[in-house]
């Protein structure tokens, strides 16, 4: 009996047929351990939302601190091709990559923690896998075969994981499997990685990290291991034995609990890692490192990298945990009931805050409530305002009211994507007197379409992956506030939009003081707006939050925080007087 597998070495793909159970394929890959890609698979049990993404990102950060090149893959078992058409309430924000990929927000964590840029192929979904297999079947690639989950779907999954990992040139690839062990939609992916472990030499080039929950019952005040035991039992029934258990809990695991998990789950005591609630997600790499997880992983994978350098990361963390100032930033949007809808903005503020030694308290305001109840006292108490991206008509007037308040009261304002268009509409209405000024997305019959559909979007019918997406060059006007913040006049920023400022209104808008200081490379699309005579009223059509990193924060978020600090001081001085 033979099984057909695909082998990827040095970016080259070739096919092999080997006897079932043979060690020849595994041995061929083990000739030189560091020439073989190492894989770390991160799974989750008991419940979703335990922090698999942060665990995966933190492990990656620790391995990078040992001098290894690390890349990441996120597997999402939903049938969508990508995250582009999903409501933020369903799955959090849609993160956009340089190549225009609309992906799960965990890839944003990978980029931030590892300081790398990923491509859309780093997000594997059930939709992508099944579509590829069906297209191959229709093309006749499986003639004479009955196309099945095993081996065809699992082979496609392995093909995608290996191709992405090898193409990256990394030493280690961390693969996060979304969902929870036991979910029916996750089964083909778990089976595929089980097969990879066998094919690559069981226990030599693959390592399994299982994140699980250790709850504490209030009635008895005791940490309970039974959910973890059952989760590992479920994983074992699939044929996967975890090498590491990362136990999530409100408090650090007691030693007796660690020993119990080690005994019942057949995991070395040193590989039972406590991941208690932390003040910041950026603490997690340090928490894992201090428990010896990095050394265990390196030994387990046969990698000799004793030297480590986490000094920059520790300095960054100290600036987050021990700020010297505090400002309040209002985030006015329509998805404010789920903070993950604006995750990249929240992280960009963490990065900006660390840069400036300032704690940013983000206060969420539902734009629909602003629309109905007006500008509240709580909103007036904020030192700066962010209006992020979004789609649809709900809460639009509340955002316009907020932009008007920020403009008139000299409150620092940053608009991003829709927030850029909102600022343009508000100025057209209330400065230029175009009372019905609007975007044709929401009012196709407006006499003043100051925001209109991109020419290349006309006639587009498919919703998924059809916007202006990905990194695009932006030319910044020398001497502008944006040029000062970026420190250069050519930048690359990521986009996700269908509508733009209508060129027919640019001259009038600029005459009113709304200066477009950033434009596309061809000079046609408006990218950055700055209001004359205002301490800080800046907006961008692109999403600066997607490229913000620890120690390299988004310049526009830094600008907003700086302006908020000055505004706070002005208000304090006014009260003193």
Image (spheres, rainbow, N blue to C red):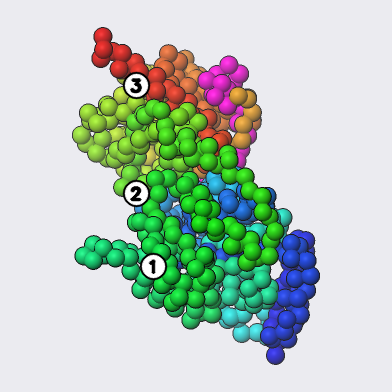
Neighbourhood count class around disc 2 (C-alpha, 10 Å): few under 14, some 14–19, many 20 upward: some
Find residue 568 and name its label.
Answer: 3
Find residue 414 and name its label.
Answer: none
Horizontal and vertical percent for residue 71?
63, 54
Element marked by disc 3: helix
Q: Is residue 140 above or below residue 475?
A: below
Residue sitting at x 63%, y 73%: 203
Q: Is residue 514 left or right of residue 14?
A: left
Q: Which residue is mark 1?
A: 257
Magenta highlight on residue 476: yes
Horizontal and vertical percent for residue 231?
42, 73
Q: Is residue 246 above or below residue 112?
A: below
Question: Residue 149 falls in which quadrant of the image?
Answer: bottom right
Find residue 338 and name its label.
Answer: 2
Question: Of the residues under marks 1 and 2, which one precedes in the sequence?
Answer: 1
Residue sitting at x 60%, y 62%: 297
Q: Marks 3/1: CA distance? A: 48 Å
- Marks 2 and 3: which is nearer the front? 3
Which residue occupies the foreground of this view, 146 or 388? 388
Residue sitting at x 32%, y 65%: 223
The residue sitting at the bottom extreme is 1
Magenta highlight on residue 13: no
């Amino acid at each position: 009996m033979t099984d057909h597998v695909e082998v990827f070495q040095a970016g080259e793909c070739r096919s092999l047929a080997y006897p079932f159970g043979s060690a020849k394929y595994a041995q061929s890959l083990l000739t030189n351990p560091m020439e073989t890609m190492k894989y770390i698979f991160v799974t989750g049990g008991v419940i979703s939302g335990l922090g698999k993404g942060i665990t995966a990102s933190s492990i990656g950060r620790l391995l990078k601190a040992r001098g290894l090149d690390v890349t990441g893959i996120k597997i999402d078992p939903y049938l969508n091709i990508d995250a582009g058409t999903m409501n933020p309430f369903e799955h959090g924000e849609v993160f956009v990559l340089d190549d225009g990929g609309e992906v799960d927000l965990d890839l944003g964590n990978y980029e931030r923690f590892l300081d790398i840029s990923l491509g859309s192929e780093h997000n594997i979904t059930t939709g992508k896998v099944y579509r590829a297999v069906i297209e191959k079947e229709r093309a006749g690639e499986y003639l004479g075969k009955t196309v099945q989950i095993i081996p065809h779907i699992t082979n496609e999954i392995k093909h995608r994981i290996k191709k992405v990992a090898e193409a990256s040139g990394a030493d280690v690839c961390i693969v996060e499997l979304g969902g929870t062990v036991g979910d029916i939609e996750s089964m083909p992916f778990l089976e595929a990685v089980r097969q990879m472990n066998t094919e690559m030499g069981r226990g030599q080039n693959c390592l399994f990290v299982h994140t699980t929950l250790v709850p504490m019952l209030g009635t008895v005040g005791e940490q309970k291991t039974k959910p973890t035991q059952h989760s590992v039992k479920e994983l074992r029934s699939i044929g996967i034995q975890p090498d590491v258990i990362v136990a999530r809990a409100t408090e650090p695991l007691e030693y007796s609990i660690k020993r119990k998990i080690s005994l019942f789950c057949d995991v070395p005591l040193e590989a039972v890692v406590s991941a208690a609630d932390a003040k910041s997600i950026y603490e997690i790499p340090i928490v894992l490192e201090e428990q010896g997880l990095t050394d265990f992983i390196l030994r387990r994978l046969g990698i000799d990298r004793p030297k480590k350098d986490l000094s920059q990361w520790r300095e960054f963390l100290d600036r987050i945990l021990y700020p010297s100032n505090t400002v309040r930033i209002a985030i006015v949007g329509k998805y404010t009931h789920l903070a993950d809808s604006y995750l990249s903005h929240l992280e960009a503020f963490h990065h900006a805050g660390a840069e400036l030694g300032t704690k940013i308290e983000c206060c969420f305001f539902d734009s629909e409530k602003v629309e109905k109840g007006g500008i509240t006292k709580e909103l007036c108490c904020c030192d700066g305002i962010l209006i992020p991206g979004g789609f649809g008509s709900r809460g639009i007037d509340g955002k316009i009211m907020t932009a008007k308040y920020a403009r008139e009261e000299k409150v620092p304002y940053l608009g991003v994507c829709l927030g850029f268009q909102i600022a343009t509409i508000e100025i057209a209405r209330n400065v230029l007197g175009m009372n019905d000024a609007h975007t044709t997305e929401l009012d196709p019959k407006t006499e003043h379409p100051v925001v209109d559909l991109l020419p290349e979007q006309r006639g587009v019918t498919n919703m998924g992956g059809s916007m202006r997406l990905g990194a695009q060059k932006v030319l910044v006007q020398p001497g502008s506030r944006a040029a000062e913040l970026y420190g250069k006049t050519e930048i690359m920023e990521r986009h996700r939009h269908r509508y733009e400022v209508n060129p027919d209104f640019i001259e009038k808008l600029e005459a009113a003081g709304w200066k477009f200081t950033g434009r596309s490379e061809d000079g046609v699309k408006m990218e950055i707006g700055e209001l004359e005579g205002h301490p800080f009223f800046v907006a961008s059509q692109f999403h600066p939050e997607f490229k913000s990193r620890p120690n390299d924060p988004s310049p526009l978020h830094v600008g907003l925080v700086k302006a908020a600090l000055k505004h706070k001081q002005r208000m304090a001085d006014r009260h003193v007087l």
